[in-house]
């Protein structure tokens, strides 16, 4: 039983990767550490912090989507100035109901460029 639980957790961790869909995205946004945007803790049992650092003023839109690419939560849709920001997702949908365990994507749009980051929610 422990082997199955370990393999399941390993698969979840390996699938929680970050990818960039536009090659010129790095001129607009970078993470305070190594990556462009950082989500922590990941995996989590309920609350995620999405941290990013803008190199210039930009319009930011962040939506959380499930594995079927359905929008679960609209987090932000507004202009931000240059600087570091942290946005919190509390594991709830737009109707303030807890979502179930699974893999979710944070779709981060910066001036029309899309950055996707996987999040593993384990409850």
Image: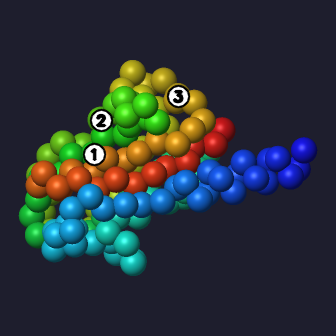
Q: Residue at x 57, y 38 (%)?
A: 102
Q: Position of residue 60 (x, y in %)?
A: 18, 51
Crowdedness near tag 3: few (<14), some (14–19) or many (≥20) residues, C-alpha within 10 Å: few
Which element type, helix, strand or loop, lies under badge 2?
A: strand
The type of colouring in the image is rainbow
The first of marks 3 and 1 along the sequence is 1
Where is mark 1, residue-wise? 62
User: Is label 3 or label 1 in front?
Assistant: 1
Q: Can you tell which quarter of the image residue 121 is in?
A: top right
Q: Position of residue 89 (x, y in %)?
A: 42, 44
User: Is residue 97 left or right of 77 when viewed as pictured?
Assistant: right
Crowdedness near tag 1: few (<14), some (14–19) or many (≥20) residues, C-alpha within 10 Å: many
Q: Are marks 3 and 1 in contact (CB under 8 Å)?
A: no
The first of marks 2 and 3 along the sequence is 2
The first of marks 1 and 2 along the sequence is 1
In the displayed structure, 21 sits above or below 70; it is below
Q: Are marks 1 and 2 in contact (CB under 8 Å)?
A: yes
Mark 2 and mark 3: span between their CA atoms?
A: 14 Å
In the displayed structure, 34 sits above or below 96; it is below
- Location of the N terminus (image quadrant): top right
Q: Position of residue 86 (x, y in %)?
A: 34, 58
Which one is nearer the viewer's eye here, 58 or 67? 67
Mark 1 and mark 2: span between their CA atoms?
A: 6 Å
User: Is residue 95 left or right of 75 when viewed as pictured?
Assistant: right
Where is mark 3, residue-wise? 98
Where is mark 2, residue-wise? 74
């Amino acid at each position: 039983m422990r082997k199955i639980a370990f393999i399941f957790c390993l698969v979840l961790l390996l699938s929680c990767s970050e990818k960039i869909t536009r090659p010129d995205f790095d001129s607009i946004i970078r993470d305070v550490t190594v990556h462009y945007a950082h989500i922590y803790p990941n995996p989590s049992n309920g609350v995620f912090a999405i941290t990013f650092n803008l190199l210039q003023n930009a319009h930011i839109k962040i939506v959380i989507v499930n594995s079927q690419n359905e929008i679960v939560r609209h987090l932000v849709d507004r202009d931000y100035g240059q600087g570091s920001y942290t946005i919190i997702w509390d594991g709830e949908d737009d109707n303030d109901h807890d979502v179930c365990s699974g893999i979710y994507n944070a779709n981060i749009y910066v001036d029309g460029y899309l950055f996707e980051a996987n999040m593993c929610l384990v409850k």
